[in-house]
Image: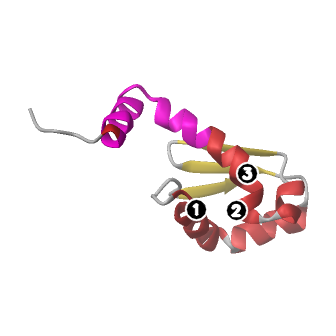
Amino acid sequence: MGQMSIGDAIKQVLESNGWKQRMLQIRMRTDWEKIVGKTIAKYTQEVHLYNRILTITTTVAPLKQELRYAKDQLIQSINQHFGEAVVKDIQIK
């Protein structure tokens, strides 16, 4: 049996038990303002991450359009913030 670092062991346990997805969801909500800024965070009612698809809910039509235009850049910013490919697509509602 090979040796494994404590960090790798914890990561493996989180992934095998499905906890990593839940932790990413919580961290996304917590860090949302840091990622997108105060203005966008203020006008987004819900941010939900599931199966690498981020769903953003807002009632502000111009913001919806802006988020759609900046979708690829936002995915890149989020993944850079987390240091891994957390989001592969974004849905705006």
Instruction: Name the residue beneath numbered marker 2.
Output: 35
Pick the quarter of the image with the N terminus.
top left
Amino acid type for the residue under numbered disc 2: Ile
CA neighbours of label 3 inside 10 A, class few (<14), some (14 to 19), many (20+): some
Instruction: Name the residue beneath numbered marker 3.
Output: 56
Mark 1 and mark 2 lie on one chain; the one further toward the N terminus is 2
- In this figure, which colouring scheme has been used for the structure? secondary structure
What secondary structure is the magenta-colored segment mainly? helix
Amino acid type for the residue under numbered disc 3: Ile
Determine whether the residue tagged by mark 1 lies in a helix, strand or loop: helix
Q: Is residue 89 above or below residue 72?
A: above
Number of labels in the image equals: 3
Mark 3 and mark 2 lie on one chain; the one further toward the N terminus is 2
Q: Nearer the viewer, mark 1 or mark 3?
A: 1
Q: Which residues are magenta?
A: 7-25
**In this rendering, would 58 be left or right of 89?**
right
Q: CA distance from mark 1 to mark 3?
A: 17 Å
The answer to whether the residue labelled 1 contacts the one labelled 2, judged by CB atoms less than 8 Å apart, is yes
Check the image and name the residue furthest to the top: 17
Q: CA distance from mark 3 to mark 2?
A: 13 Å
Instruction: Name the residue beneath numbered marker 1.
Output: 81
